[in-house]
Image (cartoon, rainbow, N blue to C red):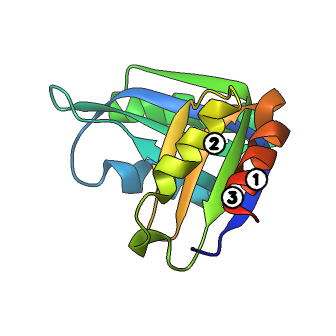
């Protein structure tokens, strides 16, 4: 049994840059500019490239959404992305553990626990030590409880 830590953040919004040119350095350009302006990005998910374009979604602190949208409007024009969209009624729910990548079935258990609780997953991001899901903000507490039951954490 892997020892997991469960966390959530309900103070976030998801922003998506649609149809971003898929070329070397584009992520550095986008996230470098955000970082240089003092904005922290908590989660990044990039879709599958199609016709040399890709959607890039990321989570930011909700209170910073308006200035981030303004900056992204400029970035969108400069890089030739199609549009910027956002969703503010979301939460991040994560499990993290040192041996997560070496433990088979952890992601499946997480997805099953959320499904059994009737919670839809909007976006998924994984790393060597964590799995993070974007869920509806009003389901965040239920999601955390479902994961605590599943992982006895």
Q: Quadrant of residue 3?
A: bottom right
First in sequence: mark 3 vs mark 2: 3
Q: Residue at x 23, y 39 (%)?
A: 22
Q: Label 1's element?
A: helix
Real-space Cα separation, disc 2 to disc 1, in angstroms: 8 Å
Between 90 and 147, the one nearer to me in the picture: 147
Circle 3 packing at 10 Å, graded few (<14), some (14-19), many (20+), is: few
Q: Quadrant for the N terminus, please.
A: bottom right
Which residue bears the numbered disc 3?
A: 38
Q: Mark 1 = which residue?
A: 149
Q: Secondary structure at mark 2?
A: helix
Query: Where residue 117 sits in the image (x, y, percent)?
Result: 71, 32
Give the image location of residue 11, x and y in percent. 82, 43
Q: Quadrant of the C terminus?
A: bottom right
Q: CB atoms at circles 3 and 2 under 8 Å apart?
A: no
Task: Sort mark 2 into few (<14), some (14-19) or many (20+) by Cα contacts within 10 Å.
Answer: many
Are discs 2 and 1 less than 8 Å apart at CB?
Answer: yes
Q: Residue furthest bottom?
A: 98
Q: Nearer the viewer, residue 65 or 128?
A: 128
Q: Is residue 29 left or right of residue 109?
A: left
Q: Position of residue 52 (x, y in %)?
A: 17, 32
């Amino acid at each position: 049994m892997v020892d997991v830590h469960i966390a959530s953040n309900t103070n976030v919004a998801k922003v998506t840059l649609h149809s971003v040119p898929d070329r070397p350095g584009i992520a550095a350009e986008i996230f470098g500019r955000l970082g240089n302006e003092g904005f922290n990005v908590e989660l990044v998910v990039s879709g599958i490239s199609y016709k040399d374009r890709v959607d890039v979604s990321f989570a930011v602190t909700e209170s910073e959404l308006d200035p981030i949208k303004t900056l992204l409007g400029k970035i969108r024009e400069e890089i030739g992305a199609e549009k910027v969209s956002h969703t503010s009624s979301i939460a991040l729910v994560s499990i993290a553990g040192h041996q997560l990548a070496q433990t088979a079935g952890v992601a499946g258990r997480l997805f099953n626990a959320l499904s059994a609780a009737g919670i839809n997953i909007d976006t998924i991001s994984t790393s060597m030590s964590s799995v993070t899901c974007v869920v509806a903000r009003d389901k965040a507490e239920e999601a955390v409880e479902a994961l605590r039951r599943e992982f006895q954490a």
